[in-house]
Amino acid sequence: MYIPSATRYNQMQYRRCGASGINLPAVSLGLWHNFGYVDDFENSRKILHAAFDAGITHFDLANNYGPPYGSAEENFGKIFKQDFVSYRDELFISTKAGYDMWPGPYGNWGSKKYLIASIDQSLKRMGIDYVDLFYHHRPDPNTPLDETMDALAYIIKQGKALYAGISNYDDLQTAQAESILNRLGVHCLINQVKFSMLVRWPEEKLLAKTKNLGVGIIAFSPLAQGLLTDRYLNGIPFDSRAAKKHGYLKKEQITADVLNIITALNKVAVKRGQKLAQMALSWLLRKDNITSVLIGASSVDQLKDNLKAIENITFSQQEDDEIERIIKTIK
Ligand code: NDP
C-alpha cells in the first residue's frame, strides 16, 4: 500500500498560473512516454509515487499517450485507483485532444464532435469524474476557433473539466482563443508549448503576450526529450528513448552538431555544480511567466535528479553569455 511522504510539500515551489487561483508545481510530470502498455507498469507506478512524494501535484496526459493510444490514461487510472483516490483533491490532472486518436473524420483535430467524445473517453479510461484541466492539443487550421473554444467551454460547463487550456498555440492564436473563451465566460488557464534551450520560439512574443493576458505557460519537453541531459554524451544507451522503436526521439536527431552543443553545455553545467538536465530546467524556471516545466522521466532516479534544478535558478551574466554563445551555434 502506498502512503505518501508526510513532508511532500516541504521542498517544491508552487507558482501562480497566470491570473488564476491555481498554483502549479515548478516541476510537473508528463505521461507521454514511459506509461503505456509497452512500459513496465511497476516502474511507472514508482515514478508517480516519487513525484507525489516530492510535491509534484500536476500530472499531464493526453488521449493518445501510450503506445498504444489511450494506454497511458488507462495505466494512470489503475494507479490512481490503487494509490491516489484519497488524494484526488491534492492532484491537478490534465488531459488533451487534438491529435490523431481514432479512425475516421471525427477522431482528430479540433471539432466539437471530437473534443466532446474524447473527454468522455479519457474520463472513462482514467476512472475519474473530472479532469482539472482539458486542453485543445494543437491549433486546427480548418475548424473555426469559435467551435473549438465552444467545445472547451461546454466541457467546463458540464463539469467534466475545471479549467481550459490550449497547446502549441502561438501568440496571436492565444489572444484569439482567450478572447473567444472570455466571451463564453471562461478564462484560458494556460498554454502548453515546446520550450527548451534548443527550442526557443516562445521567447520572441509568446511569453510577453501570455503574461499580458494572464495566461500561464508550461514548457513541454524542457530536456528536448533527453538531449539536454547526459544521456547521449557517450553514445545511445539501449534503454533510451532514441533507441526505442516507439520513442519520438529519433537517432538521426542526435547529430554531430547537437552532440557538440550538449557537450559544451554540459561543461557549463558542471562549472555551475549542476547536471546538464538540472541546468536546462533552471534556465527555463528563472524566466518570467514560466509557470512550470513539464518533464518526462523513465526512472525515479531521473525524476529525483531533475527536482534538484529548483535549488539553483540564478545565472551569472558570464554563464548566460556562454550559454547563448553555445546555443547560437545551432544550425
Ligand atoms: P523531457 O524533455 O523532459 O524528456 C524526458 C526524457 O528525458 C525522459 O524520458 C528520459 O529519457 C530523459 N531524462 C529525463 N530526465 C533525465 C535525467 N535526469 N538524466 C538523463 N535523462 C533524463 O520531456 P518529454 O519529451 O518526455 O515531454 C514531457 C511531457 O510534455 C510529456 O510527457 C507530455 O506530458 C508533454 N508533451 C506535450 C506535447 C504537446 O504537444 N502538448 C508534446 C510532447 C510532450 P529516457 O527515456 O531516454 O530515459
Image (tube, helix red, strand yellow):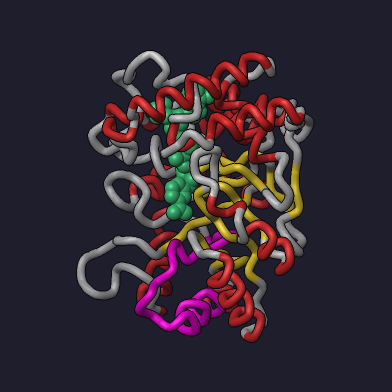
How many labels, in total? 0
Residue at 32% across, 22% down: 239
User: Which image quadrant is residue 255 in?
Assistant: top left
User: Which image quadrant is residue 204 in?
Assistant: bottom right
Q: Give the range drawn in magenta.
A: 129-154
Image position of 203 (left or right of 146): right
The image shows residue 330 at horizontal and vertical percentages of 45, 36
- Is residue 249 found inside the magenta-colored segment of the image? no
Image position of 151 (left or right of 323): left
The image shows residue 9 at horizontal and vertical percentages of 76, 35
Q: Which of 191 and 58 is in front in this view?
A: 191
Image position of 277 (left or right of 145): right
User: Which image quadrant is residue 25 in?
Assistant: top right
| On-image quarter of the C terminus | top left
The image shows residue 244 at horizontal and vertical percentages of 27, 30
- Residue 42, can we see it? no
Classify 182 as above or below 208.
Answer: below
Classify 303 as above or below 186.
Answer: above
- Is residue 133 found inside the magenta-colored segment of the image? yes
Which residue appears farthest toward the left when viewing the image?
Answer: 104
